[in-house]
Amino acid sequence: MKKEKSQLMFKLAYSKKNWGAKYDRLEHFKRFPNLKKIVKELENLGWLIVKKKVNYTGISLNSKFKKEIIEFIEEQMPEVRDWIT
């Protein structure tokens, strides 16, 4: 589960640059089998911002926890160390 969390956050941080008020649709991450559980846990930690829109649900990383998020990703996925700034 930790690996899936780090993969989701890596996708938001590195590929899409979704920090703060820049949201991506939750439906774009359907490939994660435990998506609802992952989103719920990360939201409870405060690392993920979930925004309910009229037509979709948007998710973004909380920039207040940028250091902790990057450390978690690099701990779980050492092959991407120093990719996220």
Image (cartoon, rainbow, N blue to C red):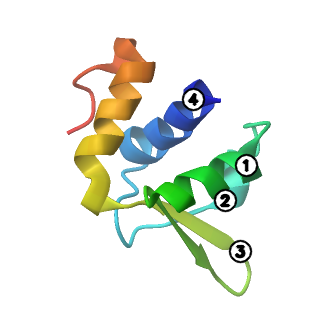
The mark that comes first in sequence, 1 or 4, is 4
Do the numbered discs 3 and 1 sit on residues whose CB atoms are within 8 Å? no
Q: What residue does disc 4 label?
A: 2
Label 1 with label 2: CB-CB less than 8 Å: no
Q: Determine the residue positioned at 48% across, 55% down.
A: 45
**Which residue is disc 3 drawn over?**
56
Measured in 3D between alpha carbons, the distance from the residue under mark 1 to the one under mark 4, in whole angstroms, is: 12 Å
- Residue found at x 38% / y 45%: 13
Between the C-alphas of marks 4 and 2, the distance is 19 Å
Return the disc, 3 or 1, that comes first in the chain's sequence.
Answer: 1
Q: Is residue 43 left or right of residue 85?
A: right
Residue 70 in the image: x percent, y percent?
30, 37
Residue at the top extreme, as displayed = 79
Q: What amino acid is found at the position of numbered circle 3 in the picture?
A: Tyr
Q: Amino acid at mark 2?
A: Leu
- The quadrant in which residue 68 appears is top left
Task: Name the residue: 75% across, 53% down.
Answer: 36
Instruction: Name the image quarter holding residue 84.
Output: top left
Of labels 4 and 2, earlier in sequence is: 4
| Cβ atoms under marks 1 and 4 closer than 8 Å | no
In this rendering, is residue 52 above or below 30? below
- Label 1 to label 2: alpha-carbon separation: 13 Å
The amino acid at mark 1 is: Lys
Pointers 3 and 2 in contact (CB under 8 A)?
yes
Using the numbered discs, state the Cα–Cα distance from disc 3 to disc 1 in whole angstroms.
18 Å
What whole-number distance in Å separates the C-alpha atoms at marks 3 and 2? 7 Å
Nearest to the eye among marks 4 and 3: give it. Answer: 4
The furthest residue to the front? 44
Residue beneath label 1, please?
A: 37
Residue bearing mark 2 = 26
Q: Which mark is first along the chain, 3 or 4?
A: 4
